[in-house]
Amino acid sequence: MPNFDAGSYFLTVLAPIRPGAVSDEPGAESWRERLAATLEKLPTALQSPATERSGAQSPFARSLRTHLARFVVIDDAVYNGRPPKNPVLTSLFGPNPIVADAPDRLNSAYLMFAAETDAVSEDGAPLPATLSPAEQDAVRDSYARHLWGVTADELRAVFGCCRGFEKVADADDFAGWIARCQVETTMPFHDYWTSPPALPSLPFKAILVVALAPVAVLLLAILGWLAGMEATPVVAWFVDWRPGPTIGWALLASAAAILAVYRFVMGRGEKPFPPPAGANLPGVLKSLYLQQKFTDFASASQELDARDLHAAFGAFLAEHRPGDDAGPTQPPGVVRLARPVADPPAPIEARVAAAPKKPRRAAKKEA
């Protein structure tokens, strides 16, 4: 289930961009050009000093489920060169290496929208450990309707340059359009682990017994057949089978055992990771908030004695409420809390003049 892992839902959408121009007027911009201009004006999150000074926040910061959102315009497939071929076989059977292969081409330009969200239908709900395919679709539709509710204007401006979006009128229409444009996420990324997850190990001994037992019977049957024995060695202690029929049954059992082991191992690998503690967006924001506040507290409490430190820490817990994700907390879309602007540093000459002077060492007298 690549779309769902560790309590998060990973949404990948490929929407074809509308061909042609926006209007029939001479020199009218194309839908591709309008999309590029719209994305250029779309604010990003306040994650650098430059964006913090701008004050223009990303519309996705209005969502308390969205961890990451990204738009990418894909104009065409990338040509990575000719696939490698055996030179000897190519010289004997072709194709002619002088003739270039036809490159893969897209039928139109596409807009990719990728988002990592909490796999929940309500803001702040606990992250689920497992979801059926139908439940995953319900989470995706719920997120699409939620996103429409908080960023409808921006979504109209961006996705309005894509095919089929002209029929979208409300949140339900948007959820259905997103479902039609969705592609499976094959490489989800999740990095909120503070310690390795507790995953069950594979029962290697049981797997070896299931896989090797029929193979061992097959080898014994082959040895008995080659030796001209009337009964299969060892197996004849339990079942009076001749080597010939035993070979056939052992082949079928070996194939079935190997297939069963493969399906079992792949099924275990396809199970989603359990959600980490505090990995929903309110929990992550609270963690970032506490990280900064506790750093300030530790810095300011260096010279307190034990009694005053205990009292100060109690006041810290009462003020910041570590167990309450609702608040106080860090707002979404920023990497740090807003701080008062400090006075600009003094010029380097003034700082050097104000620095305490070290006494000069007396010069050694010559003997």
Image (cartoon, helix red, strand yellow):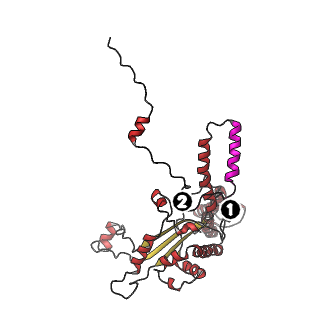
Residue 363, how many percent across, how many down? Answer: 36, 19
Above or below residue 361? Residue 137 is below
Give the percent coordinates (x, y) of residue 10: 56, 68
Spot the residue most to the bottom. Answer: 24
Please identify the quadrant where the C terminus is shown: top left
Pointer 1 or 2: first along the chain: 1
Name the foreground residue: 13 vs 39. 39
Q: Quick check: is 226 in the magenta stretch?
A: no
Name which residue type carries label 2: Val
Identify the residue at image location x=50%, y=72%.
113
| Number of residues whose C-alpha sits closer than 10 Å to that of mark 1, classed few (under 14), some (14–19) or many (20 or more) | some
For disc 2, the marked residue is 334
> Residue type at mark 1?
Val
Q: Give left or right: position of 72 versus 298.
A: left
Report the residue that reaches farthest toward the left: 98
| Observer able to see residue 218 | yes
Image disc number at residue 304? none
Please give left or right for residue 311 compared with residue 68 in the image: right
Q: CA distance from mark 1 to mark 2?
A: 70 Å
The stretch of residues the image draws in magenta is 306-333
- How many marks on residues? 2
| 1 vs 2, front mark | 2
Instruction: Give the percent coordinates (x, y) of residue 73.
Output: 43, 72
Residue 300 vs 87, above or below: the answer is above
Tell me the residue that label 1 is attached to: 235
